[in-house]
Image (cartoon, grey):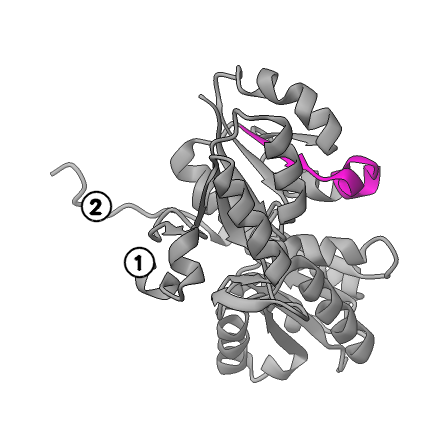
Amino acid sequence: MSDRISIVLAHGQLASGLVSAVEQITGMGDRFIAMSNTGMSGAELEQKLRALVEETGAKVVFTDLPAGSCNIAAFRLLRDRDVIVVSGVNLPTLLHFVTHPQLTPEVAATEAVERGAPTLKVTLGTSRGN
Amino acid sequence: MAIELYRIDDRLIHGQVIVGWGQPMNLGFLVLVDDEVARSEWEQELYRMGVPPELDVFFASVADATVALDAWNQDKRPGILLTSDIDTMVRLANAKKSIRAVNLGGIHHRAGRIERLRYLYLTGDEVRALQELERNGVEVTARDVPASRPVPLSALLEGKGEEGAA
């Protein structure tokens, strides 16, 4: 099993919530480090993310909102770091990623997004319109 | 519609701007006024990467924005103009008297700044610059998102900011 660590960076308490859900479902929550942007300027967020990537050797940073401060802070690392940034993270994406440790980070992240994105859908009740 | 919000926010483009303000305003364009970003293709690409494709983003130095502001204000779509610091907005407002109100959206902690609101920290010089802006006829209020109440500069300097927040 790979012991790679990845980062989930999101608004408010979303990252810690997602990681706790990964732990509950797979027992593999410790493969992620949750980070919040609360109370931080863009510069401070980038600085702390850089330090965390350096410290953990993380290759993948999962972020929530495209064009959000978490997303932009992670994009800033692309200039000089060999990292992969995923935008619009959801729970199925993290679950697929963490349960495929045999894949390279790039392939695992790509597959996880392919699996995770279509799980967002609308289901209508049968009584609608009656 | 023109530019409806002149906002100082050290995160520039981020979630509160795109979604918090952008959705209820039906935002059509963003103007990012920053001398450094205006010189950097990389920075501009960075900010464009996550922005919804239907949203136009314009980058300008203070000097270029001074020239282009009237044209942006002729735009039929609602827009937001962003600066990352007080000094940039003050320079622009001093050059363009059509700016009548400025929103303090997020200025975060660093050495020498005192907390005024949970999202607003100011040095003494920054306070004086904002007071000067008000003396010149520009209304200055703090408001991170539309769902919170605007806090006038005088109230937040008196320590009444949190009471005024929704």
Whether residue B41 is in magenta: the answer is yes
Of residues A3 and B51, which is closer to you in this image?
B51
Which residue in the structure is indicated by mark 1? B166
Between A3 and A102, the one nearer to me in the picture: A3
Instruction: Say which amino acid is labelled 2.
Output: Thr
Question: Is B116 drawn above or below residue B151 in the view shown?
Answer: below
Task: Count neighbours of disc 2 (C-alpha within 10 A) and say few if under 14, some if 14 to 19, many if 20 or more.
Answer: few
Relative side of B101 to B166, left or right:
right
Residue B138, percent from left and from top: 48, 37
Residue drawn at x 68%, y 27% is B65
Residue A97, quarter of picture: bottom right
Mark 1 or 2, closer to the camera: 1
Q: Chain of mark 2?
A: A
Magenta segment includes B147: no
Give the camera-side residue of A70 and B114.
B114
* Mark 1: secondary structure: loop
In the displayed structure image, the side of residue B154 where residue B86 appears, left or right = right
Rendered image: mark on residue B84: none
User: Gap in Å between the C-alphas at discs 1 and 2?
Assistant: 40 Å
A89 to A53, vertically: above or below: above
x and y, in percent, of residue A46 in the image: 72, 63
Q: Give, as a single range, the part of the protein colored magenta.
A: B29-44
Label 2, on which residue?
A126
- Compared with A39, B69 (above or below) is above
The x, y position of residue B126, in whole percent, is 61, 55
Closer to us: A58 or A100: A58
